[in-house]
Amino acid sequence: MAAKKPTVKKKQTEVIFDPKKIAPALVKTAHVKGMEGYKKLYNQSVKNPLAFWGKVGKEQLTWFKPFKQVLKSNFAKAENQWYVGGKTNLCYNALDRHLTTARKNKAAIIWEPDNPATPSRTFTYQQLHFEVCRMANVLQANGVKKGDRVTIYMPMVPELAMATLACARIGAVHSIIFGGFSADSIKDRIIDAGSDFVITTDTGYRGGKVIPIKAKVDEALEKMSGHVRKVLVVRHTGDHVNVVAGRDIWWHEEAEKVSGVNKAAEIDSEDPLFLLYTSGSTGKPKGVLHTTGGYGVYASFTHKIVFDIQENDTYWCTADLGWVTGHSYILYGPLINGATSLMFEGIPTFPDVSRFWKVIEKHQVSIFYTAPTAIRALMRFGDEPVKKHDLSSLRLLGSVGEPINPEAWLWYHRTVGRGKCPIVDTWWQTETGGILISPLPGATPTKPGSATLPFFGVQPLLVDSDGKPLKGATEGNLCIQFPWPSIMRGVYGDKERFYNTYFSTFKGYYFTGDGCRRDKDGYYWITGRVDDVMNVSGHRLGTAEVESALVLHQDVAEAAVVGFPHDIKGQGIYAYVILKEGRIPSDDLRKELIAQVAKEISPIAKPDVIHFTPGLPKTRSGKIMRRILRKIAAGEIDTLGDTSTLADPAVVEILVKDRQK
Ligand code: PRX
């Protein structure tokens, strides 16, 4: 289908959408009603956080043993413990406790496959419980114990959810790797986590194509002989895969050997729940560690309030379980709340650009949560594909992962939401475990492009480059000044790195890495990362990671990578490459370099532009001036600023000339 221009106008940033006007029915039944409701609870939550979170902690989770202390913290030192002394189990909270209620036969997960001709699969809470108990028994029978790190590399199939919950059930720490990552990335993560057990599938489907899954695991394991004892393989497509005797076991065979009864382990509130690797501004991705009690309380509470979950909702978050959004808002949040969560194996454009709308119609989805990059990609095809479908079941829309431009926001609101659905633009991070800044759908008047106001208990702060707090309408570095229950507890295996990365830049505060503007109404507008982290189609990548992949090529002497504005992806990847003496730039070499990055990291990290250059702008002390590289990549040639302090100012002229070609 031909791409059409979107119908909405630009620059309507100050239009305000009041839920009372656009969604009066939602406001009437919402968990938090009106701004008065929000303000009252917010004030309570920051005035007396311990009382607030103590109450929420008791309400959200079933505890085997009550907690003794709500919070034990030395925030400035990055030390935080929540619900101290409490014992619980998040798998028990997500499944078992619903079985004695009317939710026993309610759909927990509706699975929608990549190919619409394949039937959907639905698991009730009872059925999911049975499968998860069997999976837990299989893990235990194969020697997985509490505290062991289990690596999961799977496409979006129901067994991925089962494997994750089975780990939580027995107290094993899951480390899910997004199914698009390369064998090298898998290897690095398995080694860093010290993991000796892997769960995977034969192959997977994505956009009608077959993708290798087990083969990538095999390749990773070949490169590190002896680390991994067992690989549990789920048969998904039925494609032939290589089986290593003594190491690889099939889920369908193992499942036959065990019962469907498994007692959920008693887990300490501060016992680790999962590791999730994410990119930072330096070095290799780090293992963000989340623990049990605080994470479970915060993920489920934010899910209930921000998405205003009601008993009959069909809730669909389009993320992959390999990202934090999938962890908190496909799996733990929804299931702890007893909601129906839709899990989607496919992509928005297969078999055609109306797939999302078909799925919403088919399952009568009432809450839809996706990323701006998907909205922008679909908006190009105009209103027609949306309007051909019955989307009247939708009552609430959500956005996550990157700033949403007002144009995309308005299209989402008017065309997808028929002007009747509030949009929650949720700002958060892998490190925060749950949503920190977002409108509440029955309360907050929204402005397109703004994540609006802090969630309960969250105390944002904008500081200048010296760490001085800024008041009123202003712009600065976004920090948080008080702990919340699902703050990450550490970088796995590197205690110092947690403090150094997040708490050392602005003393006493958690620094998010994001820039942010606060307007006269106190609304927050995230302006994007201020560090060397890029956000490409909502995927987080470090410039340093991409540079390391490029310099592995035999012809490359040096590389510098920056993000640049991209219409669909939000940010694209722009790589400046210096070749070794005597090597000639060519289109073939460009292709090789792009393939190299895909192989080392993932296809999601492929540079959009490779710019061969004889040199890079550096200070006299040898530091690359990334500010200048970003400006050139963005085409903002007129505002390069002072280049006189550079070691070789002529380099800039060459770069600008080549950029304009
Ligand atoms: O820059 C912010 C951006 O995504 C970063 C976090 O990325 P990640 O850890 O991969 O988590 C993504 C899903 C929570 C943030 O530092 N970001 C996330 N949500 C928004 C956003 N930027 C603007 N608006 C958002 N709603």
Image (cartoon, grey):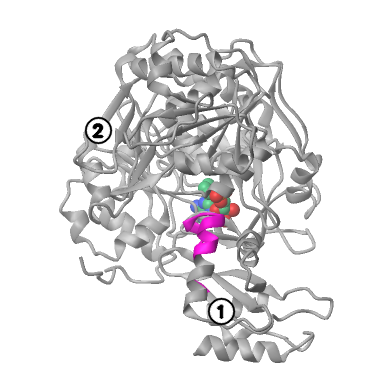
Q: Amino acid at mark 1?
A: His
Looking at mark 2, is its residue's CB closer than 8 Å to ligand 1? no
Give the prevailing secondary structure in the magenta stretch: helix
Q: Is residue 106 left or right of residue 661?
A: left
- Front residue (pair 101, 618): 618
Residue 361 seen anywhere in this rendered image of the structure = yes
Q: Is residue 380 left or right of residue 192?
A: left
Q: For mark 2, what is the residue?
A: 120
Q: For mark 1, what is the residue?
A: 611
Q: Position of residue 612 (x, y in %)?
A: 58, 80
Q: Amino acid at mark 2?
A: Ser
Task: Establish if 126 lies above or below 51.
Answer: above
Q: What SS does tag 1 mark?
A: strand
- Front residue (pair 174, 17): 174
Marker count (numbered): 2
Q: Position of residue 204 (x, y in %)?
A: 36, 41
Distance Cα–Cα, label 1 vs label 2: 45 Å
- Front residue (pair 99, 559): 559
Task: Establish if 548 lies above or below 157.
Answer: below
Q: Quadrant of residue 3?
A: bottom left
Q: Residue furthest left?
A: 388
Range of the magenta residues? 595-609
